[in-house]
Amino acid sequence: MARPLSPEKRSALLESATQAVAELGVQATTASIARRAGVAEGTLFTYFESKEALFQELYLHLKGGLAGAVMPDYPVDADYMQRMQHVFERYVSWGLANPPARFAVARLAGSGQISDDTRSLGMEPFLAVAQMMQDGVRDGVLVRAPISFLSSLIEHIADTTIEHIERHPKDARLQRKLGFRVLWRAITA
């Protein structure tokens, strides 16, 4: 009878993969990921059938962590600006608290190795944000642009804000305010 899979080992492999992908992108080897997790390379393939499968799972794991930071208390009934500020502030807080996860998800997203199905699954927790953006474009509050374009702008301005806060932590409050002000001006009609 096969041994049951250990949630701790799976978690250690995902954490190790996060670190490795943050540092090396998709060039990270399964051997280095397994070694960092303290398991044999064969053990990695007990949990993930291939390196590609590991990356799909890692992407979903990281997006789930981001959703867990951004979506609680999302103010569905607030105005567009308040909802966008909620998303921005939560994303910045998550990015500051989880640099390897932020780098890893960005590297995976840009690698060309994440399937469309996986991307769609990763977006599911954020459907309320996507709907808000579509409504904002329709209502003329946000610039008439594809949601993917607006999302990229938001992410890049938030990432720039995070980087400035990391370099100048004493000015964190000011950097957050400035980052959101720039973001709001960039995406509003």
Image (cartoon, rainbow, N blue to C red):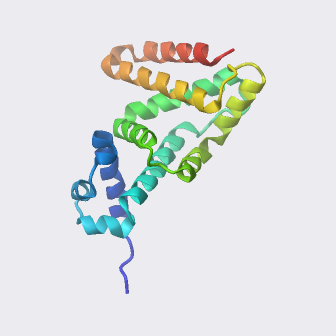
State the residue in front, 106 or 88: 106
Residue 39 screen position, x and y as percent: 24, 64
Q: Quadrant of residue 48?
A: bottom left
Residue drawn at (72%, 19%) of the image: 141
| Horizontal side of residue 178 vs 140, given as left or right | left
Residue 172 screen position, x and y as percent: 40, 18
Total numbered labels: 0
| Horizontal side of residue 135 vs 169, given as left or right | right
State the residue in front, 36 or 48: 48
Residue 24 screen position, x and y as percent: 28, 42
> Where does the N terminus fall, quadrant-wise?
bottom left
Residue drawn at (49%, 45%) of the image: 63
State the residue in front, 30 or 164: 30
Residue drawn at (78%, 23%) of the image: 139
Residue drawn at (45%, 54%) of the image: 56
State the residue in front, 116 or 74: 116
Q: Quadrant of residue 75?
A: top right
Residue 6 is at least partly visible in this image: no
